[in-house]
Structure formats: C-alpha cells, structure tokens
Image: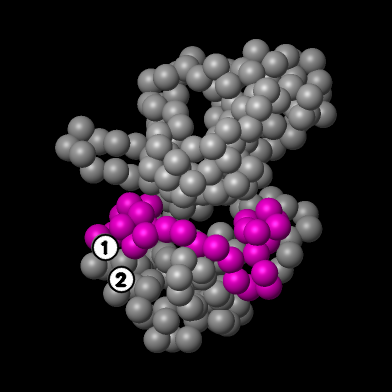
Amino acid sequence: MVNAATQSFHVDKGEVIINEGERPEHVYLIEKGWACRYKLLKNGEVHIMAYLIPGDPCDVHITILEKMDHSIRALTPMRLRKFPADEMRNIMENHHRLARALFWSILVDEAVLREWLVNMGTRPAAARLAHVFCEMLIRSQIAGCAENDSFEFPLTQAELGESMGLTPVHTNRALQKLRQEGLVSLEKKRLTILDWERLKQFSQFDPIYLHCQNLPR
C-alpha cells in the first residue's frame, strides 16, 4: 500500500474531508489527528457515528460502493495520506493478503458500530461515556498514541454528545459523575483513566469487538 501512496497533505480542523454523495478518487489514511464519520440531517442536526484516529483508513469501502453515504470531517488539524482508488481496487482484486487486511478493517468498523448501537440503546449517559473512553484508550494504545492510561482526547463536550445522543448539558453531567467517582480526569484535551478496572466494570466494557489479538490491556 505504501508504494501506491501519492502524497501526504494537511487538513485544517473542521474541514470536511469527504461529503455524503461524493465518489472520492482516493482512499485516505490518517497519519495524524482525529476525524469523525457523521450524518448531517436536514434540520441541521449532526450525529457522529465513529471517531477516526491515526492508523485508521477513512473510506476503504468506496472502492466497492458508488457513493459515500455519510461525511467525514476533521476534528483536529490532521495529516492524511491518500491512495488512488483505482490502485486500491487493484489491491482488493489481485493482492489477497492486503485485501484480507482491508476487509478485516472494514469488519472491525462494523463491529465498533454495532457496539455503539448497543451503548446508546441500553446504557445510561455516564456509562455510555465511560464505554467510549475505554474504547478510545485501547485504540490509542494500539495506534501508539497513548502513554500508559493517558492519551490525547481533543473532543468537545458537544462532539461527545453528538456521538452519544446527549445534549451538551447532559454530557457535562455524565462527565462530572465519572470525575466525582474518581474514574477519569480530563484536563487540557488529555484524558487519563484513573481506575481502569472500575471504569470497565462501570461501563460493562469488553474489548472483544475490537478483534485485536494482542490487546495492550
């Protein structure tokens, strides 16, 4: 895949990387920064469906599907590397090991989405946030972006709420509960898990859906 890359480029915070309805000519790999998958409703409301961090591809499925059915936006300043879509199709068709790796990535994305649906549908607000915090710690550790139980967490409370189906006020209350319980610390866009075992128990977090054989925890 590295040989197929054309170049790295910078994206500003808030910039839309891909719009719903587009058929991108490239597949993007995140080298630095955070992005999100989201849907923009006709009434102007936004729902975030996934967070994307370094090492995540943004849109591998576009090598098969005709158009994007959601949008992707930069949550922080980012550096992306782009790969020609035609070359990615060639990899999918003719390089079976790489195709398997790409397919694995797509399946994990689907598994994460399923877990988010369960999280939103069954857990109270504080447990929802705690579950996402557990997930993002593991993913950040896998990506080499965490130091022990602490990692960059650049999201605003509004962005957290847009992914959890919560208002900013409700999100703030849930976050304060986790702080008061001594489970997390969130200061200057950095999240620290203070008690990993209690946070897992509180949120009923089981990392099996991340499908990583060598989980750091």
In the rendered image, the vertical position of residue 17 relative to residue 110, given as above or below: above
- Indicate whether 187 appears above or below 71: below
Residue 71 locus on image (x, y percent): 40, 33
Kindly state the secondary structure of the residue where label 1 is placed. Answer: helix
According to the picture, the residue beneath numbered tag 2 turns out to be: 172
The quarter of the image holding the C terminus is bottom right
Q: How is the image coloured?
A: one colour
- Name the amino acid type tagged 1: Pro
Residue 139 lies, in percent from the top left, at 63, 56
Residue at the image point whose x is 31% and y is 57% from the top? 158
User: Where residue 137 sits: x, y (%)?
Assistant: 59, 64
Residue 146 locus on image (x, y percent):
65, 64
Is disc 2 surrounded by few (<14), some (14 to 19) or many (20+) residues within 10 Å? some
Residue bearing the label numbered 1 = 168
Locate the N terminus by quadrant. Answer: top right
Residue numbers of the magenta segment:
138-167
Q: Amino acid at mark 2?
A: Asn
Identify the residue shown where x is 45% and y is 41%.
12
